[in-house]
Amino acid sequence: MSSRPKVLGFNALLVVASILAAGPLLWMVSASLMRPGEANSSPPPLLPSDPTLEHYRALFTSLNLGRYFLNSLGVAVGGTLLAVLITAMAGYAFAKLRFRGRDSVFKVLLAGMVIPGQVAMLPMFILLREMGLINTLFGAMVPVLAPIYGIFLVRQYALSIPDDLLDAARLDGASELRIFRSVVLPAITPVLATLGVFTFLSAWNDFMWPLIVLSDDSHYTLPVALANLAGEHVLDVELMMGGAVVTVLPVFLAFLFLQRHYIQGIMAGSVKG
Amino acid sequence: MWAWALLVPSLALVTALIAYPLATGISLSLHSVVVNRPGLGRPFVGLENYARLLADETVRTALLNTVIYVVVGVISQLLLGLGAAVLLNRSSRLAWVARTAVMLPWFMPPVVAAYMWAFMLDPRYGILTRIAGLLGIDTGSQGVFADPGLALWGVLLVELWRSYPFFALFFLAGLQSIPEELYEAAALDGAGTWHRFRHITLPMLGPTFVFVGVVTMIASFQIFSEPYVMTQGGPLKSTTTLVLLMYEQGFRWWRLGLSAAIAVVLFLLTLAGTLLLRLRRSEAR
């Protein structure tokens, strides 16, 4: 149907869009492999003349990046598991169980979606300090643990579970817990995968809250550690970009592995919204 | 009973992490609380914190900047996202590769994106400064982020680069859910490409617009990492935002009342923006 020049034009635009997106990332990797000072030479090179891993070695030995990596992983994985579990429970209850006050509770909950996280930060900080949770990985997880949007997403998805299926399981004498585990959870897995990716991402990438709540450097997550590293090493472009690559890698891997999943989840879950 | 058992964890967490802090925050904003001067106590001062905000020029600058971040940010991301979605919505192998590439920046931690762009735009050594120079574009000797007239737009550009894929992703999902028959029927009726886009694609994407618009708007109101990393709100406060001020007042100077007041202003702005978008949606129906 489309004429040939038109297809060529679209393809050219696709290439440009890809370069604009991926080019800076490739430069980041390339710079992290350069010798110290090389990225700052004039004219700045695109590729390392003599690739080296010395910055990664320094990052993981003297600069303790391994520790921050584990902190980030703990915060992101722990936060994601907790968030996905409580979201699955609540989303299913709102979609499929009949109880008094269901719709009004749900409405109130949705209204909370417009409250920006920052509004809660100061009081939350004071609260956590009173509970002794400042400077703990659990304290850093807190922002992903009130996932109103996630509950909404799971509810939308769970609405499509046929009531007959649940009733049949009840007639067979299955307990509610059993139904939740063996019927509901498998049915909503795609949306949970979507939610999991997004939650992991926001916990891993979060900067402001960990910056506030983690003051002791042994608890830093990667973004905070990177900003801290910049304090001393902001001129060491190659080293900084090495730290950046380490910080980015897990989210990119998560993205590539789950790409198919989360796109399905988005299509099924939210377009109806 | 079982239903409530399922709900208790999330309702308890939402109460503890959203409702309670919001209430305490509003109350804090009506008191004068300076942590490192406990001798002063925490007297109730009514709207005095808000009056101080209104009188402060930095706050007015931050307010204006925040509005620019939100309005320009959301509109530019929306347009670019829509364009990218239309472009990516084909089944060639190249489109598949491009789809993967285009989504990557959105997954990046904002802090990383900020450092990466700051280095690439460095006035002396930056690779992009160099490329811009070769193309005959002069970015000035002090660089984008040191120029009070340019810094804000630099931050917006980085934000656009990192965030428009979110729109693209959702628009793409929206496009793929539009039944092909609609287009075929319209084509039979003799509707051209633009006509089909205007009268089928755009209306079918309506709900996606509002949803992604609201999410992006809320996120834009909270923009923090990029200015914090790239400019610290400078030069001359030209890139500072309400959230940045809230952070400085609250967590650097421990003026809790004032910081809480900024947070409440931010909340009211977000609320107003959300209602506005929702209203427009119901009008459009």
Image: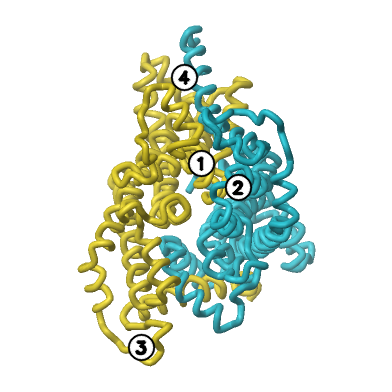
Chain colours: A cyan, B yellow
Q: Are marks 2 and 1 in contact (CB under 8 Å)?
A: yes
- Chain bearing mark 4: B
Q: Is residue B162 visible?
A: no
Q: Residues within 10 Å of mark 2 (few under 14, many from 20)?
A: many
Mark 4 on the same chain as mark 2: no
Residue at disc 4, secondary structure: helix
Disc nearest the viewer among 4 and 1: 1
Q: Which residue is mark 1?
A: B119
Dot 2: chain letter:
A
Q: Give the spatial CA distance, label 2 vs label 1.
A: 10 Å
Q: Position of residue B98 (x, y in %)?
A: 58, 27
Of callouts 4 and 1, which one flags the residue occurring earlier in the amino acid sequence? 1
Name the kind of residue labelled 4 in the image.
Glu
Residue bearing mark 4? B184
Marks 1 and 3, the one that precedes in the sequence:
3
Q: Chain of mark 1?
A: B
Mark-to-mark CA distance, 4 and 1? 49 Å
Q: Position of residue B220 (x, y in %)?
A: 40, 52
Residue at x 63% of width, y 67% of height: A217
Position of residue A182 relative to residue A35, above or below, is: below
Mark 1 belongs to which amino acid?
A: Phe
| Image spot of residue A225 (x, y percent) | 61, 58
Identify the residue at image location x=45%, y=42%: B158
Packing grade of label 3 (10 A; few <14, some 14-19, many >=20) is some
Quickly name the residue at label 2.
Answer: A240
Residue B42: assigned label: 3
Marks 3 and 1: in contact by CB < 8 Å?
A: no
Q: Residues within 10 Å of mark 1 (few under 14, many from 20)?
A: many
Task: Identify which residue is drawn at 35% across, 56% down.
Answer: B240
Three-letter amino acid code of the residue under disc 3: Arg
